[in-house]
Amino acid sequence: MTHKITLKPSGHEFVSENAETLLDSALREGVNLPYGCRNGACGACKGKILAGQVDHGAYQDHALTEADRAAGITLLCCAKPLSDVTVEAKEIAGGMDIAVKTMPCRVESIVKPAPDVAILTLKLPAGERLQFLAGQYIEILLKDGQRRAFSLANAPNDDALLELHVRHVPGGLFTDFVFKELKEKVILRFEGPHGSFFLREDSAKPLLLIASGTGFAPLKSIVEHALHNHHQRPMILYWGARTPADLYLTELPHRWENAHPNFKFVPVISEPRAGDGWQGRTGLVHQAVLDDFADLSGYQAYACGAPPMVAAARETFTTQRGLPEDEFFADAFTFAKG
C-alpha cells in the first residue's frame, strides 16, 4: 500500500511505499530532511504530524517522549504512515542546514586500485550515521591537532560506510601514514560534513563534471546520488589524469554510461606513454571540454581536482564559452606535507 506524504511548509509531496519510513521515502525522492542515527536514538529527525496517522515504530524513549507524542511529534526515521500524512518538518536546503559532528570511525577496508591511491572505507559506531550532501568532505583529525580534508566518495543514501579516496603525497604526514602504517580496524576521528561543493538539485540544467586525479571522489558521490534519485538531467563527466593507470576506477563510469542514457564519460590522458596503447582523448582535461562545447551558457559545471585545472576551467568556461559564473562550482584540492 502507498500513501501520499505532504511536507509543510515547503509543500513538497511524495509517496511512501510499503513498510517504508517517512525519512526513507523522503530521501528516496530526493527530499533532504535532517537525521542523525536513523534508528530512533538521537531525535534529530523530529517532525510534527499535522494530518493523518502513523505507526511511530521502534524508538528510544529519550528520543521521543510521551509529551512529544501528545503534541503530535514523531521521529521521521521510525514512523511509517498508516494513511496519507501531512508533516511539518524543516528541509535541508544547503550545507549550513546540516549539523557538523566530531565522530570516531573504524577503518573497515583499505584498497589500492593504483600504486599511489588508497580507497578507505570507514565504519561509524553502532547506531550512528553521518548526514551530508553529495560532494561534501570531512576532515580527519590528527593527534597533533592538524587536520586533513577528504571528499566523501559515497552517495548520501549509501551511508552505512564512508568512502575516501586518498592520493599518496610523499612526505605527507597523513598520506605516508595511510600507505605505510594504516591497518584495518584502526580507529580514526573526523569532523564533518563541510563544504559548499554539493549538487544543486533545484536546477534542471545539464551537468558538466570535470575531475583530475582523486577529484573524481566527490563527483562519484554526485553522480551516484543523481542516479539513485532517478534524476533525468544529462550528465557528462570528463576525468583527466597523466596516464591511464591514474584513472583508478575507470570501469565504474563506463558502467554508469552503459546503464544510463543520460550519462556520458570522457576520459582524458595528458601524458600517454608509447606502451600504454591509449586510443582515447589526450591533452588537458579542461581543453577537452572547450574542444567539445562552443556554448556552455545552459550548463551547470562542477570541477574538482588540482588548483591549476580548476582555475583554468573557471576562467575559460566563463569567459570563452558563456558559462554563468554562478553556475560554476569548484573544490580545488591542495596537498599539505607537514
Image (cartoon, rainbow, N blue to C red):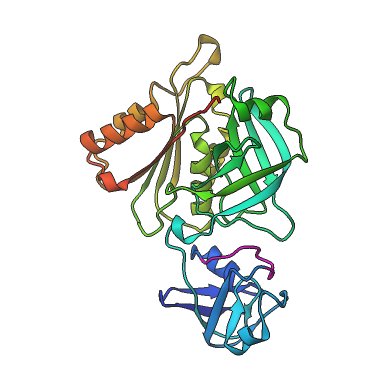
Tag count: 0
Asked if one can make out residue 117 in the rendered structure from this viewpoint, the answer is: no
Horizontally, residue 301 falls left or right of residue 187, namely left
Provide the major secondary structure of the magenta segment.
Answer: loop
Query: Which of the pair 24/261 is nearer the observer?
Result: 24
In the displayed structure, would residue 164 be above or below residue 79? above
Picture coordinates of residue 13, whole percent (x, y): 46, 75
- What residue span does the magenta drawing correspond to? 33-41
Query: Which of the pair 77/113 is nearer the observer?
Result: 77
Asked if one can make out residue 37 in the rendered structure from this viewpoint, the answer is: yes
Picture coordinates of residue 62, whole percent (x, y): 70, 75
Residue 48 falls in image quadrant: bottom right
Farthest-out residue, right? 185
Horizontally, residue 133 falls left or right of residue 165, namely left
Residue drawn at x 73%, y 39% is: 109
Horizontally, residue 295 falls left or right of residue 173, namely left
Residue drawn at x 37%, y 27% is: 308
Query: Which of the pair 58/19 is nearer the observer?
Result: 58
Picture coordinates of residue 41, whole percent (x, y): 69, 69
The C terminus, quarter of image: top right
Residue drawn at x 72%, y 74% is: 60
